[in-house]
Image (cartoon, rainbow, N blue to C red):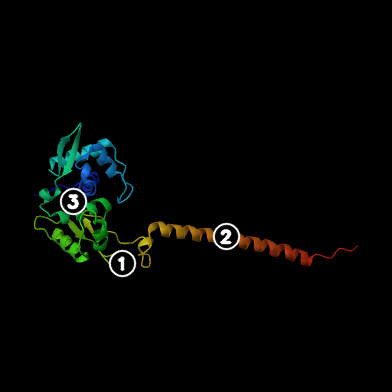
Amino acid sequence: MSLPVLSLHDTRVLGVLVEKQHTVPDTYPLTLNALVAGCNQKTSRDPIVNLDDAAVQAAIDRLKTLSFVVESSGGRVMRYAHNVERVLAIPKQSAALLAVLMLRGPQTAGELRINSERLHRFADISAVEGFLNELAARSTGALVVELPRLPGTRETRWAQLLAGPPAIETTMDATNAPGYDDASSAEIAALAHRVDALQGEVDALKTQIALLCAELGGSATAKPAID
């Protein structure tokens, strides 16, 4: 089956449905309100979006035409569930990896193992790589691709292809440079702020010293007063 390229909104909705099936099974299938909230989460999402009801409903309708989403009536509102495994003919392990890639963007196999733990617990990184390689070598069309290694990095990242070929990055952000592997973005930002503050204090001290030296120099050259 040849699938059309999905939009960011489509993959966000699909990823949320797969995720919430495992993380909040008691409220799955999801209502439109729950789907909107899941799409607009500020954590575990890259990029962060701010979709309204209409945008999410449009994505749902498009995914329904592709059989990715099925609709059911539960109580007073409609509820939605995903159909990823059947449509793509993939196991639940692969669906978990695809969902995390759709929600968080390109990641290494190690990052995928950690980030997909609530959806499926992989025994080790080799298990993750095995499923990724299967998704990349599908005879009916690859669903993931291994990206070129960025300068200064030790591992390659993987990206999903449901939204089309990813943009190839040729540079890396300073926070991904060697030596920053164990530091969080918040920690790095805090350190940078501290360095800026210290630099400001040093500049202020230099100014005070220069003024003090000028005053002392003027006093030394002045003639003593005669009573």
Instruction: Name the amino acid, label 2.
Output: Glu
Which label number is shown at residue 201?
A: 2
Picture residue at 32% right of the left edge, 50% below the top: 43
- N-terminal of the pair, mark 3 or mark 1, is 1
- N-terminal of the pair, mark 2 or mark 3, is 3
Give the CA separation, mark 3 to mark 1. Answer: 26 Å
Indicate the position of residue 4 as horizontal and vertical percent values: 15, 47
Q: Residues within 10 Å of mark 3 (few under 14, many from 20)?
A: many
Which label number is shown at residue 26?
A: none
In the rendered structure, the answer to whether residue 190 lies left or right of residue 66 reads right
* SS under mark 3: loop
Picture residue at 65% right of the left edge, 63% below the top: 209
- Residue 2 seen anywhere in this rendered image of the structure: no
Instruction: Name the amino acid, label 1.
Output: Thr
Residue nearer the viewer, 96 or 216: 96
Residues under numbered marks 2 and 3 in contact, where contact means CB atoms less than 8 Å apart: no
- Residue 155 seen anywhere in this rendered image of the structure: yes
Residue 224: image quadrant is bottom right
Q: Residues within 10 Å of mark 1 (few under 14, many from 20)?
A: few
In the picture of the structure, the residue carrying the numbered disc 1 is 153
- N-terminal of the pair, mark 2 or mark 1, is 1
Indicate the position of residue 16 as horizontal and vertical percent values: 23, 46
* SS under mark 1: loop
Instruction: Name the amino acid, label 3.
Output: Leu
In the picture of the structure, the residue carrying the numbered disc 3 is 162
Front: mark 2 or 3? 2
Residue 171: image quadrant is bottom left
Indicate the position of residue 102 as horizontal and vertical percent values: 23, 51
Indicate the position of residue 62 as horizontal and vertical percent values: 17, 40
Give the CA separation, mark 2 to mark 3. Answer: 51 Å
